[in-house]
Image (cartoon, rainbow, N blue to C red):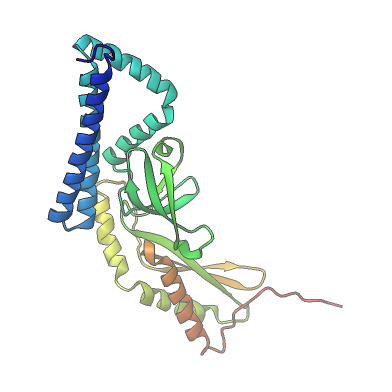
Amino acid sequence: MFPEFPWFSKILGSLLTIILFYLFALLSRRLSRKFISDNIQRYRANKRISFIMFVSAIIFIALIWAESIGSITTMLGLLSAGIALALKDPISSIVGWFDITGAKLYSVGDRIEIWHTKGDVIDISLMTTSLIEIGNWVDGEQSTGRIVRFPNNWVFTHDLYNYTQAFPYIWTEVNFTITFESDWRKASEIFTDVLKEIVGDLPREVERAVRQAQEKFLIHYRNFDPIVYFKIEDSGIKLVGRFLIDVRRRRTAESNVFTNILKRIDTEKKIILAYTTYRIIK
């Protein structure tokens, strides 16, 4: 057809294929917005559509450029050798995507930490994962407002922590110190009552969630109720409260605990908060 440019028809066919599948993807996304009301389901449907269109376009382009099964094999062999050398990281990221989605290492909405990066997953593409960052200069693991992206191949080279995969609750600890002369028994009683008020019926909810998670994970939690520990410090007696809370309510829960403790201790003359002091003896 084009004797002066034997590859012209193949290049043109490839471009038309890309445009055609791109238009199919746009149309499919519009249909998903029209027929799927749930944001999460629509997001997942769009991701599947993008992946299917991408793979289909690659196959069609390969068929355009290959004239026989033998040439396809030769072409794929040469392509794989070149890609393996030049695109090592992108390919490993794509393999990482298969591992993330296949093994369900994390999903959109999960809170994860990987290589000093923490956040809530908002997007998982073929190459990268996007998070709404938490922590960093903001205390209480609250959002910083920044979007962080990291390559999917990080799951092969760095430790991955998932806050919410088994169940969306974590153990947290708060503490305060009273003087040696204070009534530590009364302080412990107040602390325990405050923790129970904060967590409410959450231990029973966590217990049910753990039973469900035990079908997939080997989890041996037995006690889900708040508990208070003691530790002798230089400046007094430290009381450490340990309790379960929803991963996204950690800062609010800690603030409520301290607020209630301060209110209760304010009426107790035998309980005095301690602080670091120095005594000079002459």
Q: x%, y% of residue 92?
A: 39, 31
Residue 20 coordinates in the image, percent (x, y): 19, 35
Q: At 44% from the left edge and 50% from the top edge, which residue is drawn?
A: 148
| Residue at 51% from the left image edge and 79% from the top image edge | 187
In the image shown, does 161 or 130 lie closer to the viewer? 130
Residue situated in front as seen by the camera: 193 or 263: 263
Outermost residue, top direction? 70
Q: In this image, 16 relative to 170: left or right?
A: left
Q: Quadrant of the C terminus?
A: bottom right
Rendered position, 27 above or below 140: above
**Depth check, front residue: 129 or 171:** 129
* Residue 4 appears in the rendering: yes
Instruction: Name, please, the residue furthest toward the right.
Output: 282
Which residue is drawn at the image coordinates 32% and 14% (left, top)?
77
Q: In which quarter of the image is residue 59?
A: top left
| Above or below 120: residue 180 | below
Q: Where is residue 201 in the image (x, y as percent from the top left)?
A: 29, 71
Q: In this image, 208 relative to 277: left or right? A: left
Up the image or down, 262 lies above or below 77; here it is: below
Q: Report if residue 52 is visible in the image.
A: no
